[in-house]
Image (cartoon, rainbow, N blue to C red):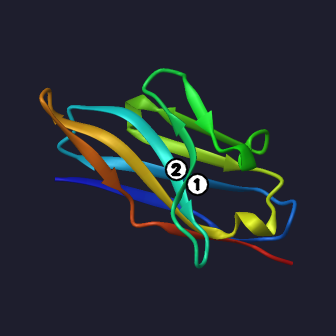
């Protein structure tokens, strides 16, 4: 079994910063891409940022220049540093990882999610 455990999130004022982390535990052979998604109230889940097991990253246009995704491969952990937060960043944030439990067996796993609220 594999679990993704998220931490971070909370309430912050506009212009503030928050950091999220997500660690993968369990029967892990290797991890390919890791990513953060978010689901604003009443809207569909959307990709925020993704990172391969190398250094390649991809960001949603709405967060470019404000958010930074990174990972620690030794700890099977992905991070999301969020700066200059805006009220429209308010959402439930989910961690996602494409994990191999065997060399031939892989699937996507999701964290439980964490609430980020940007409000004065």
The mark closer to the camera, 2 or 1, is: 2
Q: Determine the residue positioned at 60% across, 77% down.
A: 41
Callout 2 secondary element = strand
In percent of width and height, residue 72 lies at 48, 33
Mark 2 = which residue?
A: 36
For the C terminus, the image quarter is bottom right
CB atoms at circles 2 and 1 under 8 Å apart? Answer: yes
Q: Identify which residue is drawn at 60% across, 39% down.
A: 69
Of labels 2 and 1, earlier in sequence is 1
Left or right for 6, reference 109: right
Question: Does 25 sit left or right of 29 as displayed?
Answer: right
At 56% from the left and 61% from the top, the residue drawn is 38
* Outermost residue toward the top in this view: 54
As measured in the structure, the alpha-carbon distance from the residue carrying label 2 to the one carrying label 1 is: 9 Å
Dot 2 alpha-carbon crowd within 10 angstroms: few under 14, some 14 to 19, many 20 or more: many
**Residue 98 at x, y percent in the picture:** 32, 40
Name the spot of residue 85 as percent of width and height, x first: 79, 59
Near-viewer residue (39 or 22): 39
Residue appearing at x 58%, y 30% in the figure: 57
Question: How crowded is the residue under tag 1: few (<14 C-alpha within 10 Å), some, or many (20+)?
Answer: many
Q: Quick check: 52 above or below 47?
A: above
Q: Say left or right for 21 vs 90.
A: left
Kindly state the secondary structure of the residue where label 1 is placed: strand
Residue 92 image point, x, y percent = 55, 69
Marks counted in the figure total 2
- Name the mark on residue 92: none
Q: Which residue is mark 1?
A: 20
Residue 105, above or below 81:
above
């Amino acid at each position: 079994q594999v679990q993704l455990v998220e931490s971070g999130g909370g309430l912050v004022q506009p212009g503030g910063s928050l950091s999220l982390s997500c660690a993968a535990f369990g029967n892990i052979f290797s991890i390919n891409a890791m990513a953060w998604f978010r689901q604003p109230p009443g809207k569909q889940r959307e990709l925020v940022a993704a990172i391969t097991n190398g250094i390649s990253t991809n960001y949603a246009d709405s967060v470019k220049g404000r958010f930074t995704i990174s990972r620690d491969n030794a700890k099977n952990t992905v991070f999301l540093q969020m700066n200059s937060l805006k009220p429209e960043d308010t959402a439930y944030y989910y961690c996602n990882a494409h994990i191999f439990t065997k060399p031939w067996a892989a699937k996507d796993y999701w964290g439980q999610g964490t609430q980020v609220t940007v409000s004065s």
